[in-house]
Image (tube, rainbow, N blue to C red):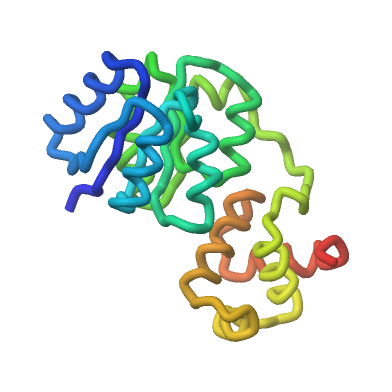
Amino acid sequence: MNPSIIIADDHPLVLKGLQGFLTEKNYNILGSATNGKEAYKLILKHEPDIAILDIRMPHLSGIEIAELCNEKIDTKIILITFEKNGVFYHQAKQLNIYGYLLKEFALVEIENCLKSVIKGAPYFSKEIEDQFPKEKEIVNIDALTPSEKRILKLIANNKTAKEIAKILCISNRTVEKHKSHIIKKFNLESKHNSLSIFAKENEDFLD
């Protein structure tokens, strides 16, 4: 089944073009918005699988919406922009954004991006990735939220996800979501014990 999608962009032609293209491809478009405030209301109301958001919009930017959604809503965020801006790019990386496309290539890349995101794999436009290569691999524990730090500390102490959920009075699903965010933030390998090894290596920085 195709994912549910919300689109937001303050450029009418871009919004109409994306909406028409995805509708033609039989994607499930729940709604569209021309500013960030409307977009965030739609996300809260519908909790779509995916939200395709312009970075620069009136009232709330795509980045600000991603910050509001982070840890609260499972909607996967795809950002689109005309700007080749390193600040936005690195903010997107820190916020666990699932997709990042330049508008000039959006209609060419959006289907591949959506297919990747549906599978849980982030998709960043090659043009933007080439311009801003990955910053290698300086561990910045401050990139973690307080909740992520607490969970990583407990992982370092050999606690299971079930035990962590009980200690922090949260659901197992929330624990797994935090773990997934940590793995993405630090580009950890997909091996089953990679997060445990990382937690133990960096335990001294988690106090």
- Place residue 99 in its image quadrant: top left
- Left or right, 173 with reference to 3: right
- Residue at the location (63% across, 70% down)? 193
For the question of whether residue 197 can be seen, the reply is no
Estimate the x, y position of residue 26 in percent, counting from the top left: 13, 38
Q: Is residue 200 above or below residue 41?
A: below
Name above or below for residue 27 compared with residue 3. Answer: above
Q: Position of residue 195 (x, y in %)?
A: 65, 65
Residue under the point 31% across and 51% down: 45
- In the image, taking residue 127 as reference, residue 90 lies left or right, namely right
Furthest residue to the right? 204
Q: Quadrant of the C terminus?
A: bottom right
Compared across the picture, whether 114 is left or right of 55 comes to left
At 28% across and 51% down in the image, what residue appears?
46
Question: Quadrant of residue 167 in the image?
Answer: bottom right
Front-lying residue, 2 or 112? 2
200 shown above or below 158: above
